[in-house]
Amino acid sequence: MLVRDAMSTVVLTIGPTHTLRQAAALMSARGVGAAVVHDPDAGGIGILTERDVLNSVGLGEDPDTEPADAHTTTDVVFAAPAWTLEEAASAMTHGGFRHLIVLDGAEPVGIVSVRDIIRCWAPARQRVPA
């Protein structure tokens, strides 16, 4: 199975000056665990995840004033739609993260998460009785 078969095509894109509260509200409304952060001035894209928001709040930072770009991962590993799920899972395991932005050329076309991969693999694998 390929990344294109598992990825979510709901790609939430926010700007670097969105606050963490705004980002969290948008992620919650769309039912996604990550947002693509596009900074046209810096010329690149990054990713902000629910864990980034959680870590900031856990440190006592104010989500109403904390900008997304202060918590965005910019050293991003991207997946291609034609990657296998095994390749995506390997990249996640090696990098220690749970989301990959899927690019078709230079455009984000989806996000694949560990949960997406598990959903695809679970029905195909035989369940062992407890």
Image (spheres, helix red, strand yellow):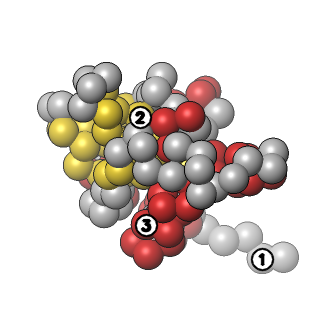
Give residue 47's position: percent from left, percent from top: 45, 40
Compared across the picture, whether 35 is left or right of 72 comes to left
Q: Which residue is mark 1?
A: 129
Q: Position of residue 62 (x, y in %)?
A: 69, 53
Q: Which residue does the image show at 50% across and 69% down from the upper left?
A: 25
Residue depicted at x 73% and y 70% = 128
* Amino acid at dot 3: Leu
The kind of residue on which mark 1 rests is Pro
Mark 2 vs mark 1, CA separation in Å? 41 Å
Location of residue 34 with respect to 16 vertically, above or below: below
The residue pinned by badge 2 equals: 46
The foreground one among 15 and 10 is 15
Instruction: Using residue 43 as the reference point, say whether residue 129 is left or right of it.
Output: right
- Foreground disc of the pair 2, 1: 2
Earlier in the chain: of badge 2 and badge 3, it is 3
Q: Which residue is mark 3?
A: 26
Q: Could you give the CA–CA distance between mark 3 and mark 1, rounded to whole angstroms?
A: 40 Å
Label 1 near label 2: C-beta < 8 Å?
no
Counting from the top left corner in percent of width and height, residue 124 is at 49, 65
Task: Specify whether residue 89 is in view.
Answer: no
